[in-house]
Amino acid sequence: MERRFSDGALTMPNYTITQAQFDAMQAVLTAIGGAPAPPPSNNLLVNGSFESPSIATYQYSPIAPGWTFGTGGGIQRDGSAWDGAPAVDGVQTAFIQGASSLSQSVTLAAGSYTLTFYLAQRQWAMPPGAVQPIAVSLDGVQQGAPITPAATSFSQYNLALTGLGAGVHTITFAGTNPVGDASTFLDAVTLQ
Ligand SMILES: [Ca+2]
């Protein structure tokens, strides 16, 4: 089979592929084209997407680059028993169950920064309908009111961190509802 491309630039007189091979190639190209954009390269946080380590289903308090998890915090993968919304970026998210927390310390130059992150409510909760508002803290000081995820799908939130001095700063995401069993998912955390 000879095929000439629309611009006439190339012919392949001696090359044939099967339908199965063509379908496989197309699937790869579709996967590449449909992959989410990588986190911004200027993200000052490490592992802000919680893609490392790779977790089979879910894990409490994993040893993860960048993050320190409290009891009740961890990483889960799309399709796990947590039944969360698909990850905003990649295939894994953090979860914060009960009044747990996760934090990352980062060395910054003096200045102002924007913390961007995505939260989603876990659909299952006890009692049903319970939510897990998340308090964001900088160096132990809570920044604004706790945020209740708008839905079981992810929503983006932005937080301005202004007037930071040079040095190590710690960003903490903490659950605020210790009653029953309610969880919030967190993904795609960036600091710029
Ligand atoms: Ca992720």
Image (cartoon, helix red, strand yellow):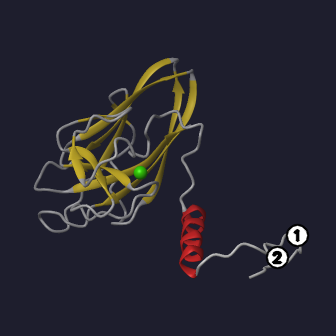
Residue at the spot of label 1: 9
Identity of the residue drawn at 84% across and 70% down: 10
Is 189 placed above or below 105 here? below
User: The residue under label 2 is which amino acid type?
Assistant: Phe
Could you tell me which quadrant the N terminus lies in?
bottom right
* In the displayed structure image, the side of residue 128 where residue 6 appears, left or right: right
Image x and y of residue 191, in percent:
51, 38
Discs 1, 2 touching: Cβ within 8 Å: yes
User: The residue under label 1 is which amino acid type?
Assistant: Ala
- Seen from this angle, which residue lies furthest top? 167
Is 11 placed above or below 61 here? below
Of 55 and 120, nearer the camera is 55
Identity of the residue drawn at 82% across and 76% down: 5
Total marks placed: 2
Gap in Å between the C-alphas at discs 1 and 2?
Answer: 6 Å
Quarter holding residue 136: top left
Identity of the residue drawn at 45% across and 34% down: 46
Of 67 and 179, nearer the camera is 67
Image x and y of residue 192, in percent:
56, 37
Of 14 and 40, nearer the camera is 14
Quarter holding residue 181: bottom left
Secondary element type, mark 1: loop
Is 51 placed above or below 192 here? below
Residue at the spot of label 2: 5
- Seen from this angle, which residue lies furthest right? 8
